[in-house]
Image (tube, rainbow, N blue to C red):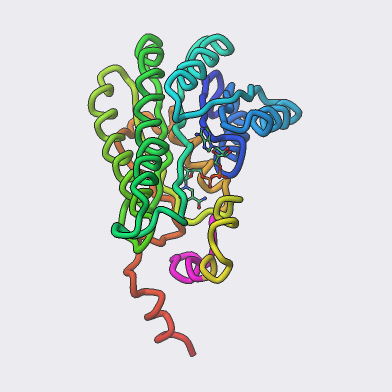
């Protein structure tokens, strides 16, 4: 309780999935949370649920692809809460049907993924930073993915755009650390959200679990707690880092799952 007491938080894409869980945990820890999402109704409903649980949240519409909409989001946070202490650039994704391997990938999807994942993070951070600097500091938390850490056979644009955000995180940390602004990323592995359920067949999800060190598929709260930590002063000495929360997927050798059978009776 109260790990985020008094913090003014803006979180994008928080009407569903991981973002919604993170917003709920942050509010339960005492933050005032602006839930900003393309789906205004779902954002309002998420905020209402937080209110019923005794937290403080406001749900608004934003399209992170549109700079003026992002500017209105930051203005709204300042009007509602009096500033922005924490910005979670959480929206992200790509269309797995058009974001394929390099030769078959739709170039329009490359541009869209770069805008949705990387450019939107630049735009929102540029708008929030002056408020953080004026207030004497802040924390930017970027949601990336293990797809930004390694290569894969599909989703070239998604992986490359998340990798761009991982490096951007280090640049922002470097450039604004002297203003007491921290910038970190959280890199989820597979997390059971509507997006994962809709995009991946169940046998692929089971195969991901087989390749995790832990015999689990993560839940939204697993990332939400990492975001609470990065938003809070508990992480005050941490900046420019990517916190990987993936059930041990990227910690182990890629052939560990196959070798496990050697130990089976
Ligand atoms: N779910 C996973 O397994 C997983 C794994 C690694 C990384 N991630 C990352 O976590 C983040 C959230 O993923 P999720 O699975 O919770 O997604 P989700 O689909 O459950 O939620 C995404 C939310 O973003 C909103 N949104 C989409 N486009 C938007 C736009 N242009 N402007 C504003 N809001 C918009 C949607 O309305 C939705 O509410 C993404 O950055 C994703 O890349 C997820």
Magenta stretch, residue numbers: 207-218
Q: Is residue 238 above or below residue 134?
A: below
Q: Quadrant of residue 255?
A: bottom left
User: Which of 207/23 is in front?
Assistant: 207
Q: Position of residue 98 (x, y in %)?
A: 43, 54
Q: Within the magenta stretch, is there residue 216? A: yes
The residue sitting at 51% across, 68% down in the picture is 204
Q: Determine if the magenta segment contains residue 260.
A: no
- Residue shown at the point (39%, 16%) measured from the top left: 132
Please, is residue 223 above or below residue 258 in the view?
A: above
Q: Is residue 183 left or right of residue 245?
A: left
Q: Which is nearer the eye, 132 or 47?
A: 47
Give percent across and percent down for residue 46. Answer: 67, 32
Tell me which corner region of the image, top left, top right, bottom left or bottom right, holds residue 48. top right
Viewer-proximal residue among 90 and 214? 90
Residue shown at 54% from the left, 35% from the top: 13
When asked about the image quadrant of residue 197, the answer is bottom right
Residue at the right extreme?
52
Residue 41 in the image, given as x and y percentages of width and height: 68, 30
Q: Quadrant of the N terminus?
A: top right
Instruction: Give residue 28's position: percent from left, percent from top.
Output: 63, 31
């Amino acid at each position: 309780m109260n790990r985020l007491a008094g913090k003014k938080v803006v979180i994008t894409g928080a009407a569903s999935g991981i973002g919604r869980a993170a917003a709920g945990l942050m509010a339960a820890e005492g933050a005032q949370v602006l839930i900003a999402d393309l789906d205004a109704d779902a954002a309002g409903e998420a905020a209402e649920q937080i209110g019923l649980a005794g937290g403080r949240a406001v749900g608004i519409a934003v399209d992170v692809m549109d700079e003026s909409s992002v500017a209105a989001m930051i203005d709204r946070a300042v009007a509602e809460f009096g500033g922005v202490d924490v910005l979670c650039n959480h929206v992200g994704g790509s269309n797995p049907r058009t974001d394929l391997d390099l030769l078959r990938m739709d170039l329009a999807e490359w541009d869209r993924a770069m805008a949705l994942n990387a450019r939107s993070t630049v735009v929102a951070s540029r708008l929030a930073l002056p408020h953080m600097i004026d207030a004497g500091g802040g924390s930017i938390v970027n949601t990336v993915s293990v797809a930004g850490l390694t290569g894969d056979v599909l989703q070239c644009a998604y992986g490359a755009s998340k990798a761009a955000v991982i490096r951007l995180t280090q640049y922002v940390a470097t450039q604004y650390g002297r203003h007491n602004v921290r910038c970190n990323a959280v890199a989820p592995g597979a997390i059971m959200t509507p997006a994962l359920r809709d995009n991946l067949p169940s046998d692929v999800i089971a195969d991901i679990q087989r390749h995790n060190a832990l015999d689990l598929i993560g839940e939204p709260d697993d990332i939400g707690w990492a975001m609470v930590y990065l938003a809070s002063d508990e992480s005050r000495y941490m900046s420019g880092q990517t916190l990987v929360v993936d059930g041990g997927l990227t910690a182990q050798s890629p052939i560990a799952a196959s070798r496990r059978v050697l130990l089976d009776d």
